[in-house]
Structures are given as C-alpha cells and as structure tokens.
Image (cartoon, rainbow, N blue to C red):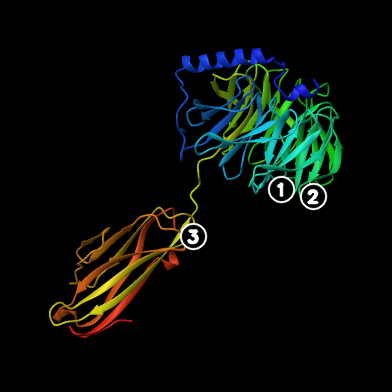
C-alpha cells in the first residue's frame, strides 16, 4: 500500500472530500450536535481531538460522555494530531496543504499555520514540549518545529515515505517509520541527525515507544502483517509479532503492560501482552480502523474507523467496545487533552502587631498577611486569627468577619511571590493586662498547600497598663 497506507485507504479527489465534508456536516446536524461559538470544555475533563481527513476539520469529543462537542476547521486533509505536554496546543498535519495547524486548546481556535514538507502525516512532541517532529511522507524528510516560535528550525532526511513519528520518554530519540524503505530512522534530538536505520517489516506505518522507553513497537502494514519489536538500547529487532491483516496504528497503555494495534484488514484491534509479545485478545471495531490511542487514564482505547466514519471506544479492562461515536468523515489521527491539573501553591502566614495608645481609645492593630511562595497559582485563601479570651475585634478590613474571639479573613487571587494583607484592631481595657497572644493560621486555600509548616504565625504583646504596651 506504500505511503497511502498511512492515509485513509482510498485516495479521494478534492470534490469527493468536499462531498464527504457536506455529508459529515449533515450527520452532525441530524445528531443534534452544533458547532459552538466557544469551547465547551474549559477546565473540565479529558477531550479527544480527532482529525477528519475528508472534512478538513478536527472533531472534539468529550470522553466523559463520548459525544461530539465541537468541530474546528483546519487545513486540507488533516491526518496526524498531537497535543503538547502542557495540554495547551494541538498540532494538526494537513496532508494536502503542506502545513501544520496550531490549535489553542483553551479556545479551540487555530492560532497559527506552519509550513512544512510535502504530505505531512505523523507528528509528535518532545517531553519538554519545546519541539515537534513532523513526518513529510512526500519528500523523505522530517520537519523540526520550534514550538516557542512555531517555525521550522531543521529538516532531517530520512527514508522513503516517512509515515509516523514517536519520541522516547527521555526526549533524546525520535523514531520514524519509512513506509517505502521498510526501515525505521532513529534521530538524535541533540543534533537532529539520523544515528541509526533499523530494518523492520514491509511498509511500516505506526510506531510507539513503551512508557519505560525500553522498546518501540512498529506496525508493518503490508505483506508481513506483523509488529516489529525494537530494543531501543541495541537498536535491533528482537521479536516479530504476527498481527492480523494490515496492522497500522499502535499505542501503549500508560502502564506499558499492554499494547493495542489496529488491524485494517480484519476490522479489529489486536491486544498484545508486552511481557510475552503475544496477542491476547481481538476486539471487533468499525470498518478500516486506522489509528488507536489509549486515553491518559488508561481506561479506554479510542479507534478511528475510516470507512465507517466512526470512533470505537474500547474498555481496556474488558477489551470490549462500550461506545461507538458517529459524525466523522474519514477519521484518522487521535490525541487527548487532559483537564488542567492543579499545581500546589504554598501560602505562608505572617502576623504583626502594633500598639496605638491613648487615654481615650487604646488598641492594638494587627496585620494578617498571606504570602504566596509558589509554585501554583493561588485562587483563594482563608486565614483565621484567634484572639485571647474576652478580646474582640473591630475595624475589620474588607473580607474579614469576627465571631467571638475568632477573626476570619478571606483572600482572593494572590500572585506568586506577592503578599496580601488584612487588618483589624483589638481594643485594650483594664482586663487586658499581661501577655496578649494572637495566632493566625491558614485554614483553607486553593489549590492545595504543600507546606503546612509555615501556615501559622503568632505574636505576643505585653501590656503593663492600657497605655504601656510593648509588641515585638
């Protein structure tokens, strides 16, 4: 099948793609899904981005409900999709445009279009997200994109019709399947030079590196009908696994114990035990399954069925299809955007006191400080101050309330390395003689606080009389 094995099986003309695009739009309308004017998934769960080769669009799937939430117009014949490690941008290869569309996942808007080589297919990010590697199947090259500037900074010559790319967990190595050459090119990311060429089976298409980085699985799409297992240390094939008819896409579970391979000829997905390199299950899916990707939680594998225009969802615990999502047009590449994780933020509490003495209204003024020392972004914090028995608080700052001998102050967002202050007064009277101790303590904050050791602060003033008070 040569280089076309990595694109939907049948090469459609431009008018056929336009017709398919119209049909896909009709299907979306009929199923009650409409294009939203703003992303429906901000700060929610995991979403799958699916490239529609025949519709020139990317479909966003809410994986919590397995329903389509939005479609995003990109370039001509989108094929590969990758999401950066920060989950902020999706890169989409446009096969017929020689471009990559950059989608801002917060807004689902295309923010930039990057020119690359002919017929780009696979795309993958380094673990740092600093670079993306794009396989240009029409010219035997890989484009290296600097993601800070979204410009191509290097072009690496590889083998015939490069299809897929995978980056090692360390970020040191990139593996590229050469569909015409029946080889895998190994690129050193430090130099962006090919340091090894590994012979595999006929017409390799998909490639994935295990989470441990110890092996790479390569799907050989043509007559071999197999998966080659490359030892990444020796850069040699150490096992060959028979897999159906026309294996194409491959993906590891996050645990690394299992791999999933699409069988385009058998309309199924083969499940491989990576410890034994043996197929342990065969899961029927839709017609012409191309790509498979396991979600970040490892609970489901999503499969793009090109001819059916569907995506099958496989429960990885039972290896059964639990959902079939429709409304696609030539679905191919799949990638996931995870919900934003909350980075802990340390809130340091300080308390200071100052006497204000006069014969009429002597009092102590207190400043209760919440200081943000990082690394996450503080959205809110609550600090309480405990007063001595019989004391009361007055002149409370906005955001503070008093109940008996407890003052509660609520703070809004605090920038990193910045402080927010709240003040209140404690009037002095004849019964205030002796030590006056007030303690402030963080009682709540968002996100979580990783360092409780600095959550409390106390200050003790000493009153010899209502007009003779000392504070540290």
Q: Is residue 441 above or below residue 273?
A: below
Labels 1, 2: front one: 2
Q: Quadrant of the N terminus?
A: top right
Labels 2, 3: front one: 2
Given residues 223 and 73, the one toward you in this image is: 73
In terms of sequence position, does the residue under pointer 1 or pointer 3 come before the other?
1
Disc 3, SS: strand
Q: Could you give the CA–CA distance between mark 2 and mark 3, rounded to whole angstroms?
A: 35 Å
Q: Which residue is mark 1?
A: 171
Given residues 234 and 195, the one toward you in this image is: 195
- Is residue 405 toward the left or the right of residue 142 in the image? left
Q: Could you give the CA–CA distance between mark 1 and mark 2, rounded to whole angstroms?
A: 12 Å
| Mark 3 burial class by Cα count in 10 Å: few <14, some 14-19, many 20+ | many
In terms of sequence position, does the residue under pointer 2 or pointer 3 come before the other?
2
Q: Specify whether residue 304 is in view.
A: yes
- Is residue 449 toward the left or the right of residue 471 in the image? right
**Are dots 1 and 3 in contact, CB under 8 Å?**
no
- Residue 191, disc: 2
Q: Which residue is mark 3?
A: 374
Disc 1, SS: loop
Q: Could you give the CA–CA distance between mark 1 and mark 3, rounded to whole angstroms?
A: 27 Å
Question: How far across and down, in percent of the image, does residue 267 sit?
Answer: 68, 18
| Mark 1 burial class by Cα count in 10 Å: few <14, some 14-19, many 20+ | some
Q: Quadrant of residue 305?
A: top right
Q: Residue at x 68, y 18 (%)?
A: 288
- Is residue 362 toward the left or the right of residue 204 in the image? left
Q: Quadrant of residue 453?
A: bottom left
């Amino acid at each position: 099948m040569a280089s076309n094995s990595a694109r939907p099986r049948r090469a459609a003309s431009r008018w056929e793609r336009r017709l398919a695009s119209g049909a896909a739009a009709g299907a979306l309308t009929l199923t009650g899904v409409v294009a939203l004017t703003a992303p429906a998934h901000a700060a929610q769960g995991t979403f799958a981005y699916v490239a529609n080769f025949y519709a020139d669009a990317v479909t966003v799937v809410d994986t919590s409900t397995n329903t389509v939430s939005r479609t995003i117009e990109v370039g001509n014949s989108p094929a590969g999709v990758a999401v950066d490690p920060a989950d902020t941008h999706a890169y989409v290869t446009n096969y017929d445009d020689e471009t990559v569309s950059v989608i801002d996942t917060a807004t689902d808007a295309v923010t930039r279009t990057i020119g690359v080589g002919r017929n780009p297919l696979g795309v993958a990010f380094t673990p740092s997200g600093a670079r993306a590697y794009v396989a240009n199947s029409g010219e035997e090259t890989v484009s290296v994109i600097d993601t800070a500037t979204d410009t191509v900074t290097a072009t690496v010559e590889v083998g015939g019709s490069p299809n897929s790319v995978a980056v090692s967990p360390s970020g040191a190595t990139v593996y590229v399947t050469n569909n015409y050459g029946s080889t895998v090119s190994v690129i050193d990311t430090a130099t962006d030079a090919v340091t090894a060429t590994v012979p595999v089976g006929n017409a390799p298409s998909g490639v994935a590196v295990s989470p441990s980085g110890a092996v790479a699985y390569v799907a050989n799409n043509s007559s071999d009908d197999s998966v080659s297992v490359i030892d990444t240390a020796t850069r040699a094939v150490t096992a060959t696994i028979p897999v159906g008819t026309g294996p194409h896409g491959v993906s590891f579970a996050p645990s690394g114990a299992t791999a999933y391979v699409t069988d385009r000829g058998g309309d199924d997905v083969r499940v491989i035990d990576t410890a034994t390199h043996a197929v342990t299950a065969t899961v029927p899916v839709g017609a012409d399954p191309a790509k498979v990707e396991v979600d970040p939680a490892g609970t489901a594998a999503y499969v793009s069925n090109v001819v059916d225009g569907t995506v099958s969802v496989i429960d990885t615990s039972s290896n059964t299809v639990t959902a079939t999502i429709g409304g696609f047009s030539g679905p191919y590449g799949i990638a996931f955007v995870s919900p934003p994780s909350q980075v802990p933020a340390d809130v340091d509490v300080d308390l200071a006191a100052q006497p204000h003495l006069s014969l009429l209204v002597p009092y102590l003024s207190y400043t209760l400080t919440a200081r943000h020392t990082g690394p996450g972004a503080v959205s809110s914090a609550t600090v309480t101050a405990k007063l001595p028995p019989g004391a009361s608080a007055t002149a409370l700052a906005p955001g503070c309330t008093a109940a008996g001998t407890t003052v509660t102050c609520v703070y809004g967002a605090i920038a990193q390395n910045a402080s927010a202050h709240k003040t209140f007064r404690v009037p002095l009277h004849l019964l205030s003689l002796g030590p006056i101790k007030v303690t402030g303590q963080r009682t709540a904050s968002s996100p979580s606080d990783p360092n409780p050791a600095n959550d409390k602060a106390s200050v003790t003033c000493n009153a010899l009389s209502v007009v003779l008070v000392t504070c540290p």
